[in-house]
Amino acid sequence: MSSVFAVVVAGGKGERMDADIRKQYLMLDGLPILTRTLLAVSEISAIEKIYLVVPFADFSFCRDHILPPLKNRMPVELVSGGSHRQASVFNGLSAITAENGIVVIHDGVRPFVPVRQTENAIQLAGAEGGCILGIPAVDTLKKVDSDDCISETIPRQDIWQAQTPQVFGLKLIRQAHEFAVSTGFSGTDDASLVEHFGGQVRMVCGSKFNIKITAPEDLVLAGGIMDYYKACTSE
């Protein structure tokens, strides 16, 4: 298999958390959320190295408080983030010295990485170029107008909620990011950039536990997931 790298992006300010520190540095069962995410990514045996994208001002903090539990588990290189997520991912991709390979792109505030599903996505991306994790929509979906009135009910049978990790051939995702810059395109995830570039992306069923921690209630839910995992492993 080609070399596999991970780009973990953790540059968000976490304004919805109403906390004194960035959301990725908040504690989850005794460890920072970001540390738990990195430890989960390190469980994916195919990955050779993690490129952790954070604000440059946070490098010292990460070396002292985030990375020590990763010692001897997997090499991690700090990369300075950009002004927004898309730019930060591109900085992470640019830091990878290899010309070819596979890259796993993941949000730093998703600590419950589905390892088996990600390994499946790596295999598919190696064959097809792009594959992301997601879950089928289960709630009824409504489109609303500017007055918050329902204008349409959207059939949900073909609708999925995208997650990360998102896995791509390194050359493909670099080209997609470069094309997005040249065309002024801004996407909400990396798969949308590949779609804009004309590439095809496969979907792999992820996990409902693979939540993104962005608000205080998410942190409460994450604590419950941690308790569930601990109860399962103690049986």
Image (tube, rainbow, N blue to C red):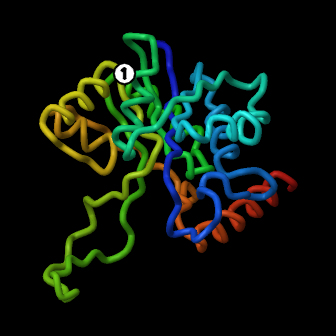
What is the tally of numbered marks visible in this picture?
Answer: 1
Please state if 25 lies on the left or on the right of 206 as rendered: right
Q: Position of residue 124 (x, y in %)?
A: 39, 29
Give the image location of residue 133, x and y in percent: 43, 45
Task: Tell which of 94 and 213 is nearer to you.
Answer: 94
- Residue ID for mark 1: 170
Please give left or right for residue 99 compared with residue 34 in the image. Answer: left
Nearer to me, 201 or 33: 33
* Crowd class of label 1 (few under 14; some 14 to 19; many from 20; radius 10 Å): many
Q: Quadrant of residue 158?
A: bottom left
Residue 125 found in image quarter: top left
Q: Is residue 170 left or right of residue 46?
A: left
Work out which residue is located at the far right of the displayed protein and give it. Answer: 234
The answer to whether 222 is drawn above or below residue 200 in the figure is below
> In this view of the protein, which residue sits in the foreground, 128 or 177?
177
Q: Is residue 33 above or below residue 97?
A: below
User: Where, quadrant-wise, is the C terminus in this rendering?
Assistant: bottom right
Residue name at image x 24 percent, y 78 percent: 142
Q: Amino acid at mark 1?
A: Leu
x and y percentages locating residue 122 in the rendered image: 46, 28
Taking 82 as reference, is 172 above or below it? above
Residue lying at the far front in this picture: please name it: 57
Which residue is pictured at 53% across the width and 61% down the height? 14
Question: In the rendering, at what x and y percent does residue 206 appear?
Answer: 48, 49
Image position of 127 with respect to 222: above or below: above
Residue shown at the point (66%, 40%) measured from the top left: 40
Report the residue at 51% width, 36% height from top.
53
Q: Secondary structure at mark 1?
A: helix
